């Protein structure tokens, strides 16, 4: 679904509420119909002008599940030959080494991809910026 459609659908409840309140004000004699229409059009203009500010948030896709682990460090808990298990933080995941070579238990690896519920990893040596274990 496109961002403009998503944004429009998010704005519909506010437009309906604004229209109902303005109609109520007109029916009670608090507002003239002309004033209510101007206020409604201003509300609509506000939504149109705010769309460019909301658009990046609507386009952004936050990775979740196995995809959220890409880039993280892991420790091989069951040797990868070709498939084994790695520990990322406190979670155990099925993993396969990208190059297909065996990786012994205890070795540090980095998650480079995820396919379904399997992590694709490659061996790496921790540097000063990632030696904390993620």
Image: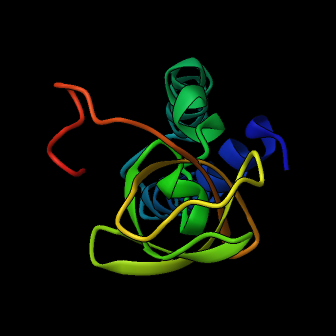
x, y percent for residue 79: 54, 74
Task: Determine the image quadrant of residue 84.
Answer: bottom right
The residue lying at 35 percent from left, 35 percent from top is 125
x, y percent for residue 5: 80, 44
The residue lying at 69 percent from left, 71 percent from top is 81
The residue lying at 49 percent from left, 65 percent from top is 104
x, y percent for residue 30: 36, 51
Looking at the picture, does residue 65 appear above or below residue 85? above
- Which residue is nearer to you in this view: 84 or 133? 84
Task: Determine the image quadrant of residue 48.
Answer: top right
Looking at the picture, does residue 57 appear above or below residue 53? below
> Image check: 50 left or right of 67?
left
- Which residue is nearer to you in this view: 19 or 132? 132
- Which residue is nearer to you in this view: 48 or 57? 57
The residue lying at 58 percent from left, 18 percent from top is 52
- Which residue is nearer to you in this view: 111 or 15? 111
- Color scheme of the displayed model: rainbow
> Image check: 13 left or right of 73?
right
x, y percent for residue 42: 52, 26
């Amino acid at each position: 679904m496109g961002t403009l459609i998503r944004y429009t659908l998010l704005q519909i409840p506010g437009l309906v509420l604004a229209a109902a309140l303005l109609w109520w004000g007109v029916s009670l004699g608090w507002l003239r119909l002309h004033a209510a229409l101007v206020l409604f059009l201003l509300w609509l203009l506000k939504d149109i002008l705010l769309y460019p500010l909301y658009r990046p948030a609507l386009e952004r896709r936050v990775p979740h599940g196995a995809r959220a682990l890409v880039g993280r460090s892991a420790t091989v808990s069951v040797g990868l030959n070709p498939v084994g298990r790695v520990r990322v933080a406190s979670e155990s995941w099925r993993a396969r080494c990208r190059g297909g070579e065996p990786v012994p238990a205890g070795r540090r690896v980095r998650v480079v991809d995820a396919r379904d519920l399997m992590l694709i990893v490659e061996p790496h040596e921790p540097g000063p910026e990632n030696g904390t274990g993620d």
